[in-house]
Image: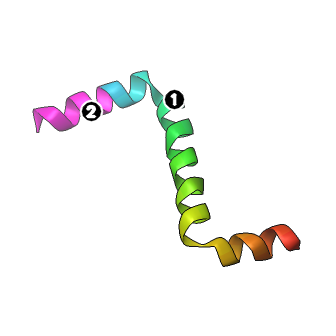
């Protein structure tokens, strides 16, 4: 439980950096796992 609260404290301190990393990982995941959808979207 203590680990979780310290995690959230660190999250608040580094929120913008964390958010950028999450967004990057998310888009990277989609590029790797859904290339067909990505191609369809970019061709529209």
Magenta residues, dominant SS class: helix
Q: Is residue 23 magenta?
A: no
Residue holding disc 2: 7
Quadrant of the drawing holding the C terminus: bottom right
Residue depicted at x 65% and y 72%: 35
How far across and down, in percent of the image, does residue 21 sit? 51, 39
Which of pointers 2 and 1 lies earlier in the amino acid sequence? 2
Q: Which mark is residue 35?
A: none
For the residue pair 21 and 10, the one nearer the viewer reads as: 21
* Image coordinates for residue 11, horizontal then vertical, percent: 38, 31
User: Would you place residue 30 above or below residue 3 in this image?
Assistant: below
How many numbered circles are shown? 2
Element type at marker 1?
A: helix
User: In terms of image quadrants, where is residue 12?
Assistant: top left
Instruction: Please give left or right for residue 32 compared with residue 13 in the image.
Output: right
Mark 2 → mark 1, Cα distance in angstroms? 14 Å
The local secondary structure at tag 2 comes to helix
Q: Residue at x 55, y 64 (%)?
A: 32
> Callout 2: few (<14), some (14-19), or many (20+) C-alpha neighbours within 10 Å?
few
Q: Tell whether label 1 touches label 2 (CB within 8 Å).
A: no
Q: Which residue is mark 1?
A: 17
Quadrant of the image containing the N terminus? top left
Q: Nearer the viewer, residue 14 or 39?
A: 39
Residue range highlighted in magenta: 1-9
Q: Residue placed at 57% from the left, 46% from the top?
A: 24
Which residue sits furthest left? 1
């Amino acid at each position: 439980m203590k680990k979780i609260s310290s995690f959230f404290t660190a999250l608040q301190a580094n929120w913008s950096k964390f958010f950028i990393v999450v967004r990057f990982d998310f888009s990277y995941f989609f590029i790797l796992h859904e290339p067909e959808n990505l191609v369809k979207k970019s061709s529209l």
